[in-house]
Amino acid sequence: MGKPKFPRRKYAKPLHPWKEERIKTEKELIRKYGLKNHKEVWKAKTLLRKYRAQARELLGKIGGANPQVKKESDQLLLRLTRINVLPENSTLDDVLALDVENILSRRLQTIVYHRGLATTIRHARQLITHGHIAVGGRKVTIPGYMVTKDEENLIGYLPSSPLNMVSHPSRPKTEVQKVVITTTQSTQTVEPVKTEGKKDTALSDVKVITDLTEKKDEALPVESTSDKPGMMVPNDSLIKKEAHQTDMAGEEVKNTEMTQRSDDAQKKKIKEKKHPKVSKKEAVDKENEVS
């Protein structure tokens, strides 16, 4: 049975620990899927080895009349389709064609990254371990949690997590929609221009045409000239505000310099009163008088 405090390990170590090819492939998997160490790769390999061994055993018994063989094969295929490792209507031969990446791609860490909830695969692991990710409203803090097909669409941020705020700095950045406004006497056309971002968003090109007959006196934040439509020209009010802010900042710097100079002068006067300067002749005369 063993001691409950020290459970048995759930992975099998490689037979030879220092094979260069195996170490290189494992390091690539660790880098690609953001794993902690080689043990997580060994766990996935052990799980895959278990499924393939069971499939080989069932394929050897499938020609007999034992109904238990068909029952166990259906259970194995149902298990693999439920975690979305195999598609529906698969066979035992498909189980033998599986790879380690088929198992690693179903981890919670990988799916959180691919769903756009994290910026990098390592960031996804951090969000999970810090308790910001929930599966069906239930907090899950295990990065290696095998996500089923039904739970895949229920992954999101925990309701009590601060990451639910769109302006949170830890959320992945999306594309910002820049709008170029061209104004004429009767119409205003708004044409969005997409910028380069990390993630693709569902923003579509939109053209909005609105009448400006009732809004001629309203100030626009961005205006364009009639000779060069589409050219961005800043508003006069914005220029005045910026100039006023720069003037105020310059005055504050001058005031601080003046106050520092006056403080330094006062300190020098106080030092001179406490320790007045004495010339060399006066110092010699005082020494002679003392002697």
Image (spheres, rainbow, N blue to C red):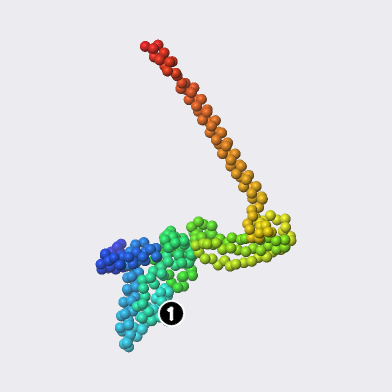
Left or right: where does residue 14 sit relative to residue 132?
A: left
Q: Residue at (34%, 85%) from the top-left corner?
A: 67
Q: Residue at (42%, 81%) from the top-left corner?
A: 89
Relative image position of residue 47 (x, y in whole percent): 34, 71
Tell me: residue 10, above or below residue 56: above
Left or right: where does residue 245 sit relative to residue 137?
A: right
Relative image position of residue 273 (x, y in whole percent): 49, 22
Q: Nearer the viewer, residue 171 or 232?
A: 232
Q: Nearer the viewer, residue 12 or 269?
A: 269
Q: Residue at (66%, 57%) from the top-left corner?
A: 224
Tell me: residue 39, above or below residue 237: below
Q: Quadrant of residue 214?
A: bottom right
Q: Quadrant of residue 139?
A: bottom left
Q: Residue at (54%, 66%) from the top-left corner?
A: 201
Q: Quadrant of residue 58?
A: bottom left
Residue situated furthest front in the rendering: 227
Q: Secondary structure at mark 1?
A: loop
Q: Mark 1: few, some, or many residues within 10 Å (few <14, many ≥20)?
A: few
Residue situated furthest right in the rendering: 213
Decide if residue 2 is in sight here. Answer: no
Decide if residue 205 is in sight here. Answer: yes
Relative image position of residue 36 (x, y in whole percent): 36, 61
> Which quadrant would the C terminus be assigned to in this image?
top left
Q: Nearer the viewer, residue 259 or 78?
A: 259
Q: Nearer the viewer, residue 16 or 128?
A: 16
Identify the residue position indicated by label 1 in the image.
Answer: 88
> Which quadrant would the N terminus be assigned to in this image?
bottom left
Q: Amino acid at mark 1?
A: Glu
